[in-house]
Image (tube, rainbow, N blue to C red):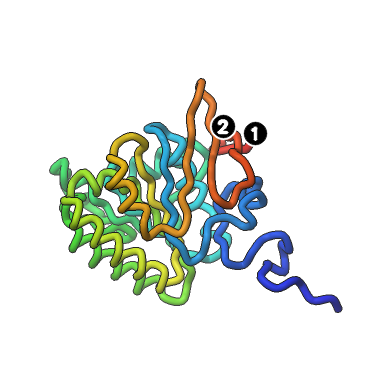
């Protein structure tokens, strides 16, 4: 019997083993399997739904692979995010999906009568130590599984913390996540940060993806892509066009 080539998935020979699916089949093929695993991926793009929907695809692809997902949110509460993902046909209600809610307490929202067992709530985006502890707890709970981590959005944490603090935090977290066999997707708002700070944020990343908008059309740019890939947002999420 002929053996499969080294470094590829036996079931899908054209896809590398050291990648995690983006949740978008056409994009997986173009990126030889998806995002690097383990790895830290910065995803820069304009304000809008597109970046978040990429994140929803990435999260929803975990269930079939028996992987865990940790979503760290500074921009909205978990229930609103679940509802938003559902509007694109993706379900973030699975037992394998955990949230670190860094948003609700900043609004003074009261705790639910029935606490969400899959959610850890902390005081806000400025509480980096509490966030680090919560993330460590969820990584321990996910031991033995591949983990997908999503920061929605990293830009908010950067705006709430001194530059030196956020750089040190990223240095620690990036190493911890790679040691846990995790792939982390950090959403970053285009045009919010100066070039020097953006360069510091990018320093420890394994890959940077950029979503470019022009004339109402979007293109995805990445080192693993031979050329910019046109994409569109539809009722079922992101599609390659």
Q: Position of residue 136 (x, y in %)?
A: 29, 69
In the image, residue 7 sits, relative to residue 156, either above or below, namely below
Image disc number at residue 232: 2
On the image, the x and y values in percent for residue 137 come to: 29, 70
Residue at x 66% of width, y 70% of height: 7
Marks 1/2 in contact by CB < 8 Å: the verdict is yes
At label 1, counting other C-alpha atoms closer than 10 Å, the crowd grade (few under 14, some 14-19, many 20 or more) is few
Of residue 106 and residue 206, the one placed in the foreground of this image is 206
**Residue at the extreme front of the image, as rendered:** 196
Q: CA distance from mark 1 to mark 2?
A: 7 Å
Q: Quadrant of residue 205?
A: bottom left
**From this viewpoint, is residue 57 visible?**
yes
The x and y percentages for residue 229 are: 60, 38
Picture mark count:
2
Residue 148 in view (yes/no): no
Which numbered dot is residue 211? none
Label 2 Cα crowd, 10 Å radius (few <14 / some 14-19 / many 20+): some
Q: Label for residue 241?
A: 1
Q: Quadrant of residue 159?
A: top left
Residue sitting at x 29%, y 46% = 196
Question: Upstream in the sequence, badge 1 or badge 2?
Answer: 2
Q: Is residue 120 left or right of residue 91?
A: left
- Is residue 229 positioned above or below 61 on the image? above
In screen coordinates, is 38 left or right of 132? right
Quadrant where the N terminus sits is bottom right
């Amino acid at each position: 019997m002929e053996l499969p080539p080294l470094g590829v998935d036996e079931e899908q020979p054209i896809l590398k083993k050291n990648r995690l699916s983006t949740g978008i089949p056409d994009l997986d093929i173009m990126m030889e399997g998806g995002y690097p695993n383990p790895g830290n991926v910065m995803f820069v793009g304009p304000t809008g739904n597109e970046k978040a929907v990429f994140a929803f695809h990435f999260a929803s692809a975990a269930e079939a692979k028996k992987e865990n997902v940790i979503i760290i949110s500074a921009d909205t509460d978990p229930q609103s995010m679940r509802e938003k993902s559902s509007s694109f046909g993706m379900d973030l209600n699975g037992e394998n999906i955990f949230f670190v809610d860094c948003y609700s307490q900043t609004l003074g929202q009261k705790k639910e009568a029935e606490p969400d067992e899959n959610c850890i709530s902390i005081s806000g985006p400025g509480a980096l130590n509490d966030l680090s502890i919560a993330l460590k707890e969820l990584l321990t709970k996910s031991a033995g599984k591949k983990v997908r981590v999503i920061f929605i959005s990293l830009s908010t944490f950067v705006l709430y913390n001194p530059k030196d603090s956020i750089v040190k935090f990223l240095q620690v977290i990036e190493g911890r996540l790679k040691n846990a066999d995790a792939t982390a997707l950090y959403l970053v708002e285009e045009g919010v940060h100066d070039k020097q700070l953006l360069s510091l944020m990018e320093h420890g990343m394994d890959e940077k993806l950029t979503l470019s908008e022009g004339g109402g059309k979007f293109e995805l740019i990445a080192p693993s892509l031979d050329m910019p890939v046109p994409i569109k947002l539809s009722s079922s999420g992101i599609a390659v066009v």
